[in-house]
Image (tube, rainbow, N blue to C red):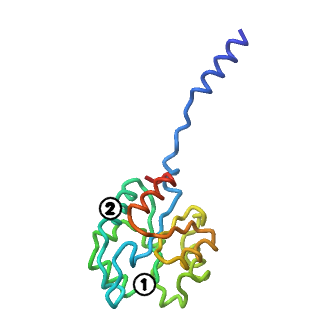
Amino acid sequence: MFKRIALLGLIVSSTLVPIASPKAVTEKVVAWDIHKVLCTKPARRGYQCTPQESTFELVKELHSRGVKQVILSNISRESFCILIRCYPNYFKYFDREGSLADAQVLLTRKPHGKYFKIFLKNNPGIRPDNIIFFDDKPKNIKGAREKRIDGQIFCSAAQARTILNRKGLL
């Protein structure tokens, strides 16, 4: 009798499938640079750019899956505010509290370690290795990786999609 119960318990436990908790998806954060990643290269001023539709389709999809997204850019606060006013429907998907887009006031910029340190301080409770950061400049990726942030060179939305699929976010 004891053997049957033990065997039954073994069969039941081996057929149970663990269910992922809803927080499993939200533990990761995707950080985006603005220029040449979310938007085109600016003409002269930081706000003189336009959203890249293919990248924002990816942003919307991540948002619908509950993935926290932030901006991590050297754009000035003034230019960032103008950009948000010009394209409110694009920038509504980002956690502005966790974003860092004010390099002028901080007196530091990417790729410097101090910049990433301030970013991490603005996002307490999020481990650096749970942040996936997309930027078009290798030196900024190197700076992020020195702070254990998962920096990824951005070439296109399709390439970013592949990376995010591999990381289990899509």
In the picture of the structure, the residue carrying the numbered disc 1 is 75
| Quadrant position of the N terminus in the picture | top right
As helix, strand or loop, the secondary structure at mark 1 comes to loop
Question: Callout 2 environment at 10 Å: few (<14), some (14 to 19), or many (20+)?
Answer: few
As helix, strand or loop, the secondary structure at mark 2 comes to helix
Mark closer to the observer (2, 1): 2
Q: Is residue 114 above or below residue 11?
A: below
* Residue at the farthest top position: 1
> Whole-percent x and y of residue 155?
43, 69
* Residue at the farthest right position: 2
Which mark is drawn over residue 93? none
Q: Is residue 76 above or below residue 15?
A: below
- Taking depth in this image into account, of 105 and 41 the one nearest to the observer is 41
In the picture of the structure, the residue carrying the numbered disc 2 is 57
Q: Amino acid at mark 2?
A: Glu
Residue at the location (40% across, 53% down)?
Answer: 65
Total count of labels? 2
Question: Callout 1 environment at 10 Å: few (<14), some (14 to 19), or many (20+)?
Answer: many
Q: Amino acid at mark 1?
A: Ile
